[in-house]
Amino acid sequence: MPLDKQSEAVRVKAEAMGLPSIHSISPLEARSREFQQIRTSGPTVHRVQDYLIRGSAGMLTGRVYFPTDKGPFPVVVWFHGGGWVQGGLEETDSIVREIAVRSECVVVSVGYRLAPETKFPYPVEDCYAATQWVVKNAEKLNAGNERIAVGGYSAGGNLAAAVSLMARDRGEFDLSAQLLLCPVLDRDFTRRSYIRYGEGYGLTMESMKWYWNHYLNDVNQSANPYAAPLKSENLAGVPGCLIVTADHDPLSDEGEAYAMLLSESGVSVKLSAYTGVMHGFISMSDVVDTGMNAIQEAAEFLNGRLSN
């Protein structure tokens, strides 16, 4: 199936801009370019408040979105995308607002440290520590600590899956759900979706190699399930999961494989494969209608898993 009309228009416009590929520039240049992009504001929420969160080696910023003045709420700990190198609280703001309003959850968006300045395993340890902070501070957040989910987009989906594994393995707190939107789950560039869609559809194979190279100290770390959750031999005991994939995305086969591994491990999982769209379609929801459909599905999943 070809790209839908809206996605194709985005692809053509991006191609016409003639910007250098991510893998040909430095991390600082990539961040600067991303920050200069125009972003939608997202819906209004009742209150947004920044907290200092103790990470794995110092303080992080957590931006908390309260959907209404009521509660207590379920809570979603959210990890932004950007290949572990880019992204931040501002860049993910509109998606977080949509999720908070549509799911009626408090959403805690985590400003974890970025690579290559901070390499694996420290970004994922930051995300685990931030989730632990949410559990311990549920009352402050007007949240029920027995109803906590983790979620993220792209590299953020990778971090959410890894935190779910860490929570199971360490046994320090329980999670109720994980939401993985177009997640990075493995460092395997031989998959069919990489071969077919690894060039010309936004996220490329070479850019993913660039992201992985900045994230890992050594390629051998890609065998660690906390870096590449698909390397896990058994996913039993992790929370129920929604995985959203895009068909014109080099990462789509990873999402399908992870859904199968979850199911084989006895974990409740739904794989929702969207067609005619590219990797970034959810962040393009202001111009790609399917992106908003995926956000709505994510919100309904959270509401179903986290409601009393």
Image: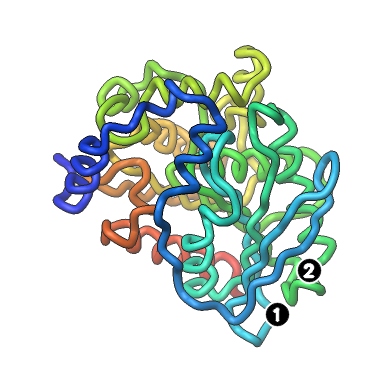
Task: Please say whether residue 268 is visible from this viewpoint.
Answer: no
Which disc is residue 38 wearing?
A: none
In the picture, measured across the screen, residue 228 lies left or right of residue 166, that is left
* Residue at x 47% of width, y 60% of height: 95
Tell me the crowding category of disc 1: few under 14, some 14 to 19, or many 20 or more residues within 10 angstroms, Cα based.
some
Q: How far apart are marks 1 and 2 (CA)?
A: 9 Å
* Residue at x 45% of width, y 67% of height: 41
User: Can you say which quadrant of the picture contains the N terminus?
Assistant: top left
* Residue at x 59% of width, y 81% of height: 46
Task: Please say whether residue 198 is visible from this viewpoint.
Answer: yes
Q: Are marks 1 and 2 in contact (CB under 8 Å)?
A: yes
Tell me the crowding category of disc 2: few under 14, some 14 to 19, or many 20 or more residues within 10 angstroms, Cα based.
many
Q: Quadrant of residue 207?
A: top left
Position of 78 relative to 185 (above/below):
below
User: 231 and 260: which one is in front?
Assistant: 231
Pointer 1 or 2: first along the chain: 1
Residue bearing the label numbered 1? 72
Q: Where is residue 160 in the image (x, y as percent from the top left)?
A: 61, 45
In the picture, measured across the screen, residue 29 lies left or right of residue 12, that is right
Count of numbered badges drawn on the protein:
2
Identify the amino acid type marked 1.
Pro
Position of 130 relative to 46 (above/below):
above
Residue bearing the label numbered 2? 138
Position of 151 relative to 73 (above/below):
above
Q: Please tell me whether mark 1 sits on a helix, a strand or a loop.
A: loop
User: 179 and 216: which one is in front?
Assistant: 216
Identify the amino acid type marked 2.
Ala
